[in-house]
Image (spheres, rainbow, N blue to C red):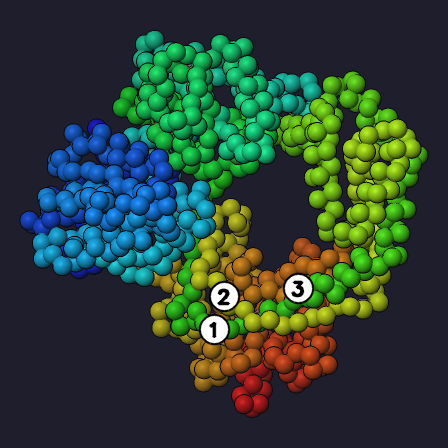
């Protein structure tokens, strides 16, 4: 077993960054399935070989202390025969302090003294709240012993790749332990998909393109979605129909994998189908068990051997042999289908898996990148070559049957807030929602909603629902489009009175924005009365009403909101203090076109005054954009933004004295940055606008929204944003707002401005400015004069 060319290059880059005389940090970024564990094993081995007599203790940590650390120990132990050094490996777990009254000394061996160095593997949760290691200072003692030793060094390897599956509370609890390990380490390797805080870090990256171009093929390449679904006659299909189509295709794949002549190296490899299910809860236990049984029945129909593996303690199978994760993952296993939860998907190595099935009401809501990664691995790497690696090779393709899109964590770029601006205050503009929506408390609004309750219409609708149930044996409540097909999969169906009640809860919950508790109680009470008069169940009448009248409830709501908007009563605009987020990233799919790289000179004002600094740029984009490691850059997402940045850069370069008044400026992160609320033009609801760029000129705040002079895709929205900006000025004139600010929409191509400013001289001629330079210069002069 040896490293591929791409893996070898990455390992060498990491090892070459190791230097016992200095502290270094490496950020290691690689796709799921690239073989990170094997690469890290080789990194450890090669660093040990150049330790020059120093005792090296490696700590490999994940956030969770569940199954992943144990799996890492198993895998690395398996790799030892292929390495030069037979180093000691130990998996470390801390007991919970709530489960034992034993004293520290009885647990001191849990972080063993490794006299010859070696590898310790643990989950950082072992150092979280309520753990012996934390409460009794065992981690501190362990690190102090290393710091006080003249011949021992710590090398810390942190695997962040799967942190998305962990709860925020767990991440927060383990931060202190992570920080202590980082501080004590001579060499720190961070494995992550989204690099942050890269100050003086060495970035080693493997891209999917590099893996595809490598002579050794680690990953399957051809993704096929929902194949065969179009052959079904029905427009709306059931879970079992989706699974049956998957089973039919899987039977074909099994035949293709037979590979009698071993042309593709698949002889003796049995493909596997994975069915991912969500965690069972007390609330969904009965329904969950029912769905699992339906899955098993269909698998039996297609003569497929299955295992339901939820943990080492919770497993079931159609066969008699002992079930373990290690055995069913083997290429030779005769288990065709594995029903599993999210947990085992993390760090689970099963290259023979080629199909993933995700069913409604039993699977997780979204596909995780780690789960998809399980079916992307090539099961016959050794026998794959450029001559047999194509569409004819059964292992070239992988299959997904699902309603969800495959997630992308391909990071395009990321940015970190500079330390000097972490406490810098900006402003956001908000609307008092309690006051704006107070019409929902009026008698007029309640009466208008109650008028929608029609006994005649409800009787007709109930008859139609009963007819549907008698014809189909169920009531179709929800359906959702299947990807790459014209079909819909039935999301939820109603089979009994309990299902009907649960559907009503969902329908009532969806109305929460359109009424209040008083109105809801009045409506439900009236529906109950009509149910008694019609001799129908309350659940049936309620379901009929909400499926029949939901859109009309919204219309009544919008009507009252429109009246209030026209009267301009009860709209209270406020300014609140805000800070920028410490970090933001842009993924590849965030902007499908026109994005680009705007390079910065290290000492130019545009770079020095920027609140954010570039943290990371994907390897492909670095190559395409001719960006070097030391280069600083910005990302623009349209030609207009590029135009603005060019003009702003020229202003800062030419007007050095005036630009000194500019404290800072920033690209404003969408969804997490500075925002201003406004009233939507169509629904009259409150919306948020995130300006593209923000500036702080002394204590004066400037927000700039960039638009195209000829091609504004939503002119009405832009008009409402401008109108909202001007409302904040009106509140300022009433002396309800003390802050000083300018909010504008700017069209760089035509140098057109619109908006407002609390500086009267600027506001009086805001639409007359014909250049960004004169606009900013006037603000600087006025702000300087006032102060």
Residue at the (56%, 29%) spot, across then down: 285
Q: Which residue is tagged 3?
A: 677
C-alpha span from label 3 to label 1: 21 Å
Residue at the (73%, 77%) spot, across then down: 730
Q: Which residue is tagged 1?
A: 424
Give SS at disc 3. Answer: strand
Q: In this view, does 209 lie to the left or right of 55?
A: right
Q: In this view, does 331 lie to the left or right of 88?
A: right
Residue 712 or residue 663, whichever sits in front: 663
Give SS at disc 1. Answer: loop
**Can the viewer see residue 175?**
yes
At which x and y percent is residue 436?
A: 75, 63
Query: Against 596, is 78 above or below?
Result: above
Query: Against 526, is 680 above or below?
Result: below
Residue at the (37%, 40%) spot, across then down: 31
Q: How crowded is mark 3: few (under 14 residues within 10 Å), some or many (20 or more)?
A: many
On the image, which quarter does residue 109 sit in? Answer: top left
Q: Quarter holding the N terminus? A: top left
Q: Are marks 2 and 1 in contact (CB under 8 Å)?
A: yes
Q: Which of marks 3 and 1 is nearer the N terminus?
A: 1
Residue 496 or residue 779, whichever sits in front: 496
Query: Against 537, is 118 above or below?
Result: below
At which x and y percent is residue 193?
A: 39, 46
């Amino acid at each position: 077993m040896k490293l591929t060319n791409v893996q070898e290059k990455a390992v060498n880059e990491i090892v070459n960054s190791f230097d016992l005389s200095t502290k270094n940090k490496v950020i290691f970024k690689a796709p799921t399935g690239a073989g990170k564990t094997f690469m890290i094993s080789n990194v450890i081995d090669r660093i040990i070989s150049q330790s020059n007599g120093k005792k090296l203790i490696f700590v490999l940590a994940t956030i969770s202390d569940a199954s992943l650390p144990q799996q890492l120990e198993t895998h690395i132990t398996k790799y030892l025969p292929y390495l030069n050094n037979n180093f000691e490996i130990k998996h470390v777990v801390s007991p919970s302090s709530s489960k034992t009254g034993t004293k520290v000394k009885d647990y001191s061996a849990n972080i063993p003294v490794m006299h010859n160095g070696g590898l310790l593997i643990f989950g950082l949760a072992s150092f979280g709240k309520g753990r012996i290691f934390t409460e009794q200072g065992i981690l501190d003692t362990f690190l102090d012993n290393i710091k006080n030793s003249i011949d021992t060094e710590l090398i810390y390897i942190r695997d962040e790749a799967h942190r998305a599956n962990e709860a925020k509370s767990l991440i927060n609890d383990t931060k202190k332990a992570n920080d202590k390990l980082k501080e004590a380490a001579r060499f720190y390797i961070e494995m992550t998909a989204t690099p942050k805080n890269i100050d003086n870090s060495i970035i080693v990256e493997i891209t999917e393109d590099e893996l595809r171009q490598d002579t050794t093929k680690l990953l399957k390449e051809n993704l096929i979605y929902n194949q065969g679904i179009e052959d079904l006659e029905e427009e709306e299909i059931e879970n079992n129909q989706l699974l049956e189509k998957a089973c039919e295709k899987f039977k074909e794949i099994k035949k293709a994998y037979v590979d009698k002549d071993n042309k593709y190296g698949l002889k003796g490899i049995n493909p596997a189908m994975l069915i991912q299910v969500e965690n069972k809860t007390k609330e969904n236990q009965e329904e969950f068990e029912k769905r699992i049984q339906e899955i098993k029945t269909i698998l039996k129909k297609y003569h497929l051997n299955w295992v339901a593996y939820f943990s080492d303690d919770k497993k079931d199978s159609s066969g008699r042999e002992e079930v373990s994760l290690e055995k069913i993952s083997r290429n030779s296993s005769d288990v065709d289908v594995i029903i599993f939860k999210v947990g085992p998907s993390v760090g689970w190595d099963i290259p023979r898996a080629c199909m993933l099935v995700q069913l409604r009401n039993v699977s997780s809501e979204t596909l995780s990148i780690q789960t998809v990664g399980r079916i992307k691995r090539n099961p016959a790497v050794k026998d794959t070559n450029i001559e047999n690696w194509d569409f004819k090779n059964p292992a070239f393709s992988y299959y997904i049957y699902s309603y969800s899109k495959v997630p992308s964590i391909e990071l395009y770029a990321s940015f970190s807030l500079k330390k000097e601006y972490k406490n810098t205050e900006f402003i956001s503009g908000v609307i008092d929602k309690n006051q704006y929506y107070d019409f929902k408390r009026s008698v007029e609004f309640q009466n208008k909603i109650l008028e929608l309750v029609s006994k005649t219409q409800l009787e007709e609708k109930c008859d139609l629902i009963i007819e549907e149930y008698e014809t189909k044996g169920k009531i179709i409540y929800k359906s959702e489009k299947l990807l790459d097909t014209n079909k819909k999969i039935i999301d939820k169906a109603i089979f009994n009175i309990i299902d009907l009640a649960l559907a009503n809860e969902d329908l009532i919950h969806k109305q929460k924005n359109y009424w209040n508790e008083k109105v809801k109680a009045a409506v439900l009470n009236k529906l109950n009365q009509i149910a008694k008069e019609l001799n129908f169940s309350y659940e049936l009448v309620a379901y009929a009403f909400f499926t029949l009248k939901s859109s009309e409830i919204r219309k009544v709501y919008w009507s009252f909101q429109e009246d209030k908007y026209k009267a301009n009563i009860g709209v209270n605009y406020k300014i609140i203090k805000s800070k920028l987020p410490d970090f933001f990233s842009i993924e590849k799919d965030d902007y499908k076109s026109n994005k680009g790289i705007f390079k910065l000179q290290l000492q130019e004002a545009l770079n020095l005054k920027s609140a954010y600094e570039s943290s990371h740029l994907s390897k492909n984009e670095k190559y395409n954009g001719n960006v070097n490691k030391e280069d600083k850059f910005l990302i623009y997402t349209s030609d207009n933004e590029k135009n603005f940045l060019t003009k702003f850069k020229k202003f800062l370069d030419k007007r050095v004295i005036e630009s000194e008044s500019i404290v800072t400026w920033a690209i404003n992160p969408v969804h997490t940055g500075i925002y201003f609320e406004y009233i939507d033009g169509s629904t009259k609801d409150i919306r948020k606008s995130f300006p593209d760029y923000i500036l702080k000129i002394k204590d004066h705040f400037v927000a700039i929204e960039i638009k195209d002079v000829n091609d504004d895709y939503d002119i009405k929205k832009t008009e409402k944003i401008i109108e909202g900006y001007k409302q904040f000025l009106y509140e300022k004139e009433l002396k309800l707002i003390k802050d000083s600010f300018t909010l504008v929409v700017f069209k760089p191509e035509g140098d057109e401005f619109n908006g407002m400013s609390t500086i009267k001289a600027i506001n009086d001629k805001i639409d007359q400015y014909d250049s960004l330079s004169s606009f900013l210069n006037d603000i600087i002069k006025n702000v300087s004069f006032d102060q």
